[in-house]
Image (cartoon, rainbow, N blue to C red):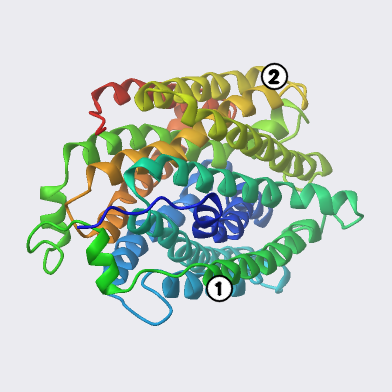
Amino acid sequence: MKQKPDLSFWKLWNLSFGFFGVQIAYALQSANISRIFATLGADPHNLSYFWILPPLMGILVQPIVGTMSDKTWTRFGRRIPYLFVGAAVAVAVMCLLPNSGSLGLSVGAAMIFGLIALMFLDTSINMAMQPFKMLVGDMVNEKQKAKAYSIQSFLCNSGSVVGYVFPFLFTLLGISNTAAEGVIPDSVIWSFYIGAAILILCVIYTTLKVREWNPKEYKEYNPVAEGNEEKASWITLLKNAPSTFWKVGLVQFFCWAAFMYMWTYTNGTIADTVWGTTDVASKGYQAAGNWVGILFAVQAIGSVIWAAVLPQFKNMKAAYMFSLVLGGIGFATVPFIHNQYLLFVPFLLIGCAWAAMLAMPFALVTNALQGYGHMGAYLGLFNGTICIPQIIAAVLGGFILQMVGSAQSSMMIVAGVSLCIGALCVIGIKEKN
């Protein structure tokens, strides 16, 4: 078996560049879904239920994409066809979702339309996102894998910054940030339109620049346990998964539950603690919605900076734990800060956790999976450690919100505690050198 060659910086960059566009779409979704459905008329106690669909689609789509792409060999590549199709569908749906309140539908019908659009959007984003992780697993050697995922983290967070600031930027440019009751403001609608255009351009770039290995080259560079690559059910793969797969998954559970509550409740938290309003039709609430995008962009900037720092740690586990603790502190302090600019500090800390969550789990797991075969299927199944926590957190969100006094700001403290528990769970991971 040949050793995978070292790749130049720009080859590693090209492998992940399309992630920049995909993440713009994901950022627009994560920063605006609660705002969109609250504007359409959703009750705060029910907001978390709208967040069940995205991870549910992820847990269904990504293992399928991973398994199918393991068996796909075309003149366009092994993973790239799924990337391109997913991006094309995402572009179409991004033009529909923000118009849910502009079609003359009743409140209930508008929410159903929005839910269906959200389902297709997240399905397509997941389909476009998964191939990037698999491309790194396929073509990058163990020595460069942490660097490759750090580049992916950088592009991911750079895309997030762009997607998050769009509504705020377009409002500054004079596009209306308010609308009739139940209608999404034009600043949000145009953010989705421009994000869709950037997404397809970035994916086209990756499609043109990356040449995947053919079946013969792939077998020369990738070790496969005897007989495993040909036939194995998902249950068999999970039974045979290395212990690192499950231990990292436990950490993922607490981390992704924390971020689910951030995405769901930050808009209501900032509107209440900084603008002093819970009226979704008010200018203050919509201004808070724009500012949430800025705060998420600050988080992404913190992630970009921290992603450059992470490779300097000699111990990957120590870096992972430290990053999660910083994020937990950031979450816990948000409800106590009433100045919109001082909120930059906790969101920079949250960005440290986000950077580690994007890079460390996949570096640990793909290293542990060497020799197991079915890299795409395993990474698709590993996506369950991202999706299942979000589904459980979304189902329990309304109940937990009631337990903490129905104050959305208290959910940020819940998120901080969850992230710190995740940091403690890192101790149990055995790192493969």
Q: Nearer the viewer, residue 321 or 208?
A: 208
Quadrant where the C terminus lies? top left
Q: Position of residue 173 (x, y in %)?
A: 90, 54
Verify CB contact (< 8 Å) between mark 1 and mark 2.
no
The kind of residue tagged 2 is Ile
In this image, 272 relative to 68: left or right? right
Q: What kind of element bears circle 2?
A: loop
Quarter where residue 431 is shown: top left
Quadrant where the N terminus lies? bottom left
Q: Position of residue 326 (x, y in %)?
A: 52, 20
Q: Residue at x 34, y 51 (%)?
A: 383
Q: Residues within 10 Å of mark 2 (few under 14, many from 20)?
A: some
Q: Earlier in the sequence, mark 1 or mark 2?
A: 1
Which labelled disc corresponds to residue 149?
Answer: none
Q: Nearer the viewer, residue 232 or 373?
A: 373
Q: Residue at x 58, y 65 (%)?
A: 114
| Structural distance between the alpha carbons of marks 1 and 2 | 47 Å
Which labelled disc corresponds to residue 208?
Answer: 1
The outermost residue toward the left is 226
* Residue 177 visible here: no
Q: Position of residue 119 (x, y in %)?
A: 48, 65
Task: Answer above or below: position of 123 versus 306.
Answer: below
Q: Residue at x 49, y 41 (%)?
A: 150
In this image, 128 relative to 425: left or right? right
Task: Answer above or below: position of 105 versus 115.
Answer: below
Quarter where residue 149 is shown: top left
The kind of residue tagged 1 is Leu
Q: Residue at x 65, y 54 (%)?
A: 36
* Residue tagged 2: 337
1 or 2: mark nearer the eye: 1
Q: What kind of element bears circle 1?
A: helix
Q: Residues within 10 Å of mark 1 (few under 14, many from 20)?
A: few
